[in-house]
Image (cartoon, grey):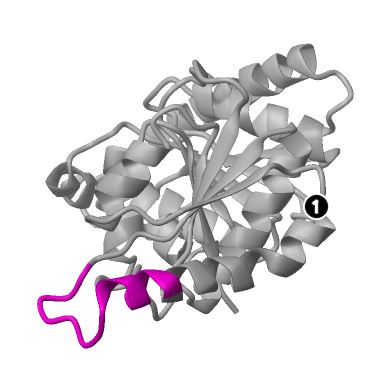
């Protein structure tokens, strides 16, 4: 059941305590689109108190239940996409650490989300979304809700701010839009400072120049992707979430030095994980 993670694998973290079909469907469809193998990973946490309680029966029960869940998920993927190579890993350890380690060798990591409040997310012992998103070495996709596209043509939103991480996010977003035959809305949210050092029109022109420069080379590489530039004014979380209300996904960078920093994870990334209803894809910069 276990094996070395191939650098081309899409890794899905299976949560044994919640329904996994929504995130599994996204991961299976993405593996099908990219013609990549899918690895299903489930981590069984260690026993709580080795000094006073023999937790071996419980651990064995958890491993049996985990193996059963992985088998069901594997069968489900094979029925949905028979041509996708799917394998499973049942590992011991805390899920966030196990998935963070797996991200070193994976093409991307996919997680489900319970849409917990920020406080609940931090206090939840089984929380994986925040730590994995913050620490992963590859793109992380957080899928909270089933795909509900009501707007045609389908589109993807990417937020950029000039940072290296947003440059990486933009490249990923172009590739994803091209794979899906979707249009791409490139959004640079403008937050006017309390004191403008120069004319507002000049500031907006600088934003437009940033967008044009950032997308120039990629637009030529992906000629079939319909591209729009948008510069809304307001808070980045609210503006990006609103732009992505009917999107296939919203893509943002993490660990950048631009406007998407503020917490270790990034205030905008963290906000979108709890605000957006479409998949949130975060991409680390170099």
Q: Is residue 78 or residue 274 the one in the foreground?
A: 274
Q: Is residue 51 or residue 186 the one in the foreground?
A: 186
State yes or no: residue 204 in magenta: yes
What residue appears at the point 27 percent right and 39 percent down from the top-left corner?
Answer: 275
Q: Is residue 123 left or right of residue 94?
A: left
Residue 214, position as x, y percentages in the image: 61, 70
- In the displayed structure, 282 sits above or below 216; it is above
- In the displayed structure, 190 sits above or below 282; it is below
- The answer to whether one can see residue 148 in this image is yes
Asked where in the image residue 59 lies, by quadrant, the reply is top left
State yes or no: residue 177 in magenta: no
Q: Is residue 71 or residue 252 the one in the foreground?
A: 252
What residue appears at the point 60 percent right and 27 percent down from the top-left corner?
Answer: 154
Q: Which residues are magenta?
A: 192-205
Tell me the crowding category of disc 1: few under 14, some 14 to 19, or many 20 or more residues within 10 angstroms, Cα based: some
Residue 282, position as x, y percentages in the image: 50, 56
**Residue closest to the far right:** 83
Which residue is under mark 1? 222
What residue appears at the point 57 percent right and 61 percent down from the top-left corner?
Answer: 169
Residue 88, position as x, y percentages in the image: 70, 36
Determine the secondary structure under disc 1: loop
What residue appears at the point 71 percent right and 55 percent down from the top-left corner?
Answer: 107
Which image quadrant: the C terminus? bottom right
Q: Is residue 124 or residue 66 the one in the foreground?
A: 124
Q: Is residue 93 left or right of residue 239?
A: right
Residue 56, position as x, y percentages in the image: 40, 39
Which image quadrant: the N terminus? top right
- In the displayed structure, 242 sits above or below 281; it is above
């Amino acid at each position: 059941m276990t094996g070395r993670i191939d650098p081309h694998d899409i890794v899905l973290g299976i949560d044994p305590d919640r329904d996994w079909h929504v995130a599994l469907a996204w991961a299976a469809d993405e593996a099908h689109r990219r013609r990549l193998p899918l690895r299903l990973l489930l981590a069984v946490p260690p026993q709580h108190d080795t000094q006073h309680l023999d937790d071996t029966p419980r651990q064995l029960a958890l491993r049996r239940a985990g193996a059963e869940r992985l088998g069901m998920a594997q069968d489900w993927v094979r029925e949905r996409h028979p041509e996708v190579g799917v394998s499973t890993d049942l590992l011991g350890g805390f899920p966030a650490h196990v998935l963070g380690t797996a991200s070193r060798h994976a093409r991307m990591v996919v997680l489900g989300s319970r849409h917990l409040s920020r406080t609940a997310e931090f206090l939840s012992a089984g929380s994986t979304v925040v730590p994995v998103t913050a620490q992963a070495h590859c793109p992380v996709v957080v899928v909270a809700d089933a795909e509900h596209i009501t707007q045609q043509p389908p589109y993807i939103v990417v937020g950029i701010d000039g940072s290296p991480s947003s440059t990486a996010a933009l490249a990923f977003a172009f590739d994803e839009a091209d794979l899906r035959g979707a249009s791409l809305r490139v959004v640079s949210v403008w937050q006017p400072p309390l004191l403008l050092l120069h004319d507002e029109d000049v500031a907006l022109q600088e934003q437009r120049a940033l967008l044009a420069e950032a997308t120039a080379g990629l637009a030529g590489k992906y000629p079939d992707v319909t591209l729009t530039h948008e510069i809304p004014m307001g808070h980045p979380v609210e503006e990006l979430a609103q732009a992505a209300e009917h999107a296939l996904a919203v893509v943002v960078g993490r660990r950048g030095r631009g406007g998407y920093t503020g917490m270790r994870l990034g205030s905008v990334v963290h906000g979108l994980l709890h605000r957006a209803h479409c998949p949130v894809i975060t991409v680390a910069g170099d």
